[in-house]
């Protein structure tokens, strides 16, 4: 019978058999899948695993710290953090087009990750423990979807940590290949991962970079991070995390509108709330959030986030709107 205990036991044995005395590398994104895959491999081979976390500066408030501190504390994993914030900001400077942003972020991510990987390989050279494996958090639905090969139009170029090119030098370790998302969460919980990671809602690989409509700058990221943190805090306080699929918070950086705050006229930016309900993100409906919760979020954002004088609600289903704005 299926129990998380059995799955863990089986996978630990399989990983040990596959990796032997060699070493493995795993990219962490902050998401559930890569975290659970890494924790399973860590349980199997311990210090033979090194995780890499690329800090692209596009994460939400507290998320990098969650990986750096809570994940490491709960797993004891070797973690190499690469601070690439400047690099991503430089690469994104002057770019407003959504697909161009996505491509730049995906490209830079792969470059930084591969460089970190090469450093880990170099460090282990001569120790007799070659780095021969790359761990990926591929789930069963990922395999079915890509294997199905149906001609779904490429609406947005998705960027995933799991979407790295299969480097010929490395063999893949994919301990979640037979699992669905809810099973992955159960395994993660059983492995003792922090609740914030195990129950995390979907968040796109390109992060806040595709939630700023307009050019991505440090100032805009900081502003959006504040607004997003307020929305998340209030949704959690209202007990709505399990009810909604996710709630992108979007900054319309190229739009300004007139407002009145304190005793003066303002000319600030709007923030869009995009709460959605969904089963699989292929289709979605806008969530009918309680007015009091929306009111609280709106009041707090306009009071606490400088340069934002308006909060608007996206009431579009998918289709026709996608969940993310870019
Ligand atoms: P859309 O905007 O296409 O989003 O309706 C569907 C779901 O996918 C997430 N998303 C991404 N996830 N890399 C990811 O890992 C990406 O590049 C990416 N773009 C969108 C989005 O948050 C939603 O859950």
Image (tube, grey):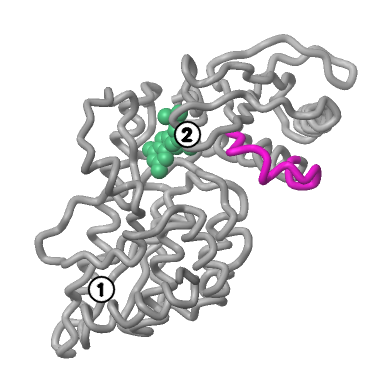
Q: Residues within 10 Å of mark 2 (few under 14, many from 20)?
A: some
Nearest the eye: 125 or 42 = 42
Whether residue 236 appears in magenta in the rendering, the answer is yes
The number of numbered discs placed on residues in the rendered structure image is 2
* Label 2 beta carbon less than 8 Å to ligand 1: yes
Q: Position of residue 182 (x, y in %)?
A: 51, 55
Disc on the earlier residue, 1 or 2: 1
Could you say whether the residue bearing mark 1 is in a helix, strand or loop?
Answer: helix
Q: Is residue 224 above or below residue 23?
A: above
User: Which residue lies at the image location 40% right of the left edge and 69% below the top edge?
Assistant: 38
- The residue lying furthest to the left in this view is 168
Nearest the eye: 260 or 320 = 320
Identify the image quadrant of the N terminus.
bottom left
Quadrant in which residue 311 is drawn: top right
Identify the image quadrant of the C terminus.
top left
Majority SS type along the magenta span: loop
Q: Position of residue 281 (x, y in %)?
A: 47, 34
Span shown in magenta? 235-248
Quadrant of the displayed image that contains ligand 1 = top left
């Amino acid at each position: 019978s299926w129990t998380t205990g059995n799955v863990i036991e089986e996978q630990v044995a399989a990983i040990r058999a596959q990796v032997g005395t060699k070493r493995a590398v795993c990219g962490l994104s902050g998401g559930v899948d890569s975290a659970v895959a890494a924790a399973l491999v860590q349980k199997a081979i311990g210090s033979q695993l090194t995780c890499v976390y690329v800090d692209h500066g596009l994460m939400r408030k507290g998320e990098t710290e969650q990986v750096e501190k809570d994940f490491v504390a709960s797993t004891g994993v070797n973690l190499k953090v690469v601070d690439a914030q400047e690099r991503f900001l430089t690469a994104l400077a002057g770019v407003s087009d959504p697909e161009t942003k996505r491509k730049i972020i995906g490209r830079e991510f792969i470059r930084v990750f591969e460089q970190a990987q090469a450093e880990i390989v170099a460090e282990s050279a001569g120790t007799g423990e070659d780095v021969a494996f790359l761990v990926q958090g591929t789930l069963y639905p990922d395999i079915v979807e890509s294997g199905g090969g149906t001609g779904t139009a490429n609406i947005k170029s998705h960027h995933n940590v799991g979407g790295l090119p299969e480097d010929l030098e490395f063999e893949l370790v994919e301990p979640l290949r037979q699992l669905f998302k809810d099973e992955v969460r159960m395994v993660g919980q059983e492995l003792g991962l922090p609740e914030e990671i195990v129950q995390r809602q979907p968040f796109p690989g390109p992060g806040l970079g595709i939630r700023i409509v307009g050019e991505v700058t440090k100032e805009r990221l900081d502003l959006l991070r504040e607004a997003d943190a307020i929305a998340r805090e209030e949704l959690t306080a209202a007990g709505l995390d399990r009810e909604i699929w996710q709630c992108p918070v979007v900054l319309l950086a190229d739009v300004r509108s007139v407002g009145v705050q304190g005793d003066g006229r303002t000319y600030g930016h709007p923030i869009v709330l995009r709460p959605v309900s969904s089963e699989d993100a292929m289709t979605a409906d806008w969530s009918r959030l309680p007015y009091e919760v929306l009111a609280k979020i709106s009041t707090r954002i306009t009071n606490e986030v400088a340069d934002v004088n308006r909060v608007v609600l996206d009431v579009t289903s998918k289709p026709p709107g996608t969940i993310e704005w870019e």
